[in-house]
Amino acid sequence: MEAARTTEVVIGATSSHSFEDAIAAGVSRATATLRGVEGVRIKDMNVLIEDGNITGYKVNLEVTFVVEDERESGVVVDPEEYSRLQEAAEELEDLRAYDEAIMELETGKDELTPWALAKGRVAAEREDLRRRGEL
């Protein structure tokens, strides 16, 4: 769902010719840096004066734009590549479990567990998660 939102970020723009040129410059900057710009509100307008002469026209604009929802995206992957990636993820999980076991040993939180036993426990837990549909 999209929701329009007015930002509190103000875009300022100036022109030496007119307020219209300053507004156009501000809108141009807003649309170049934000997606989904729907409109602007002129927050304030100022005439710049130097030595009694008008030197410029300044506007501050509040921008209204569409905030996009985060959406999940998908990718099409060859079945063989998917299997290879799945195996790599499982191996990475095994390595993380091993690293965690080593850290527990080094900090005295655990006793030495043979790698074959640890790997078997990880495999059993993974199979249990698959049976329950959680993996």
Image (tube, rainbow, N blue to C red):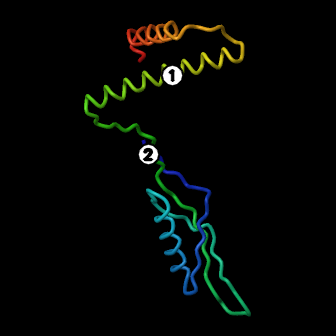
**Residue 121, above or below 59:** above
Q: Secondary structure at mark 1?
A: helix
Q: Which residue is mark 1?
A: 95
**Residue 76, above or below 12:** above
Residue 65 percent across, percent down from the top left: 48, 56
Q: Residue at x 53, y 71 (%)?
A: 26
Q: Quadrant of residue 50?
A: bottom right
Left or right of 36, for residue 51: right
Neighbours of disc 1 within 10 Å: few (<14), some (14-19), many (20+): few
Q: Residue at x 65, y 82 (%)?
A: 47
Residue 109 percent across, percent down from the top left: 70, 12
Q: Between 67 and 93, which is closer to the camera in this rendering? A: 93
Q: Residue at x 57, y 62 (%)?
A: 62
Q: Which residue is mark 2?
A: 2
Residue 90 percent across, percent down from the top left: 42, 21
Q: Residue at x 44, y 45 (%)?
A: 2
Q: Mark 2 or mark 1, which has the lower sequence index?
A: 2
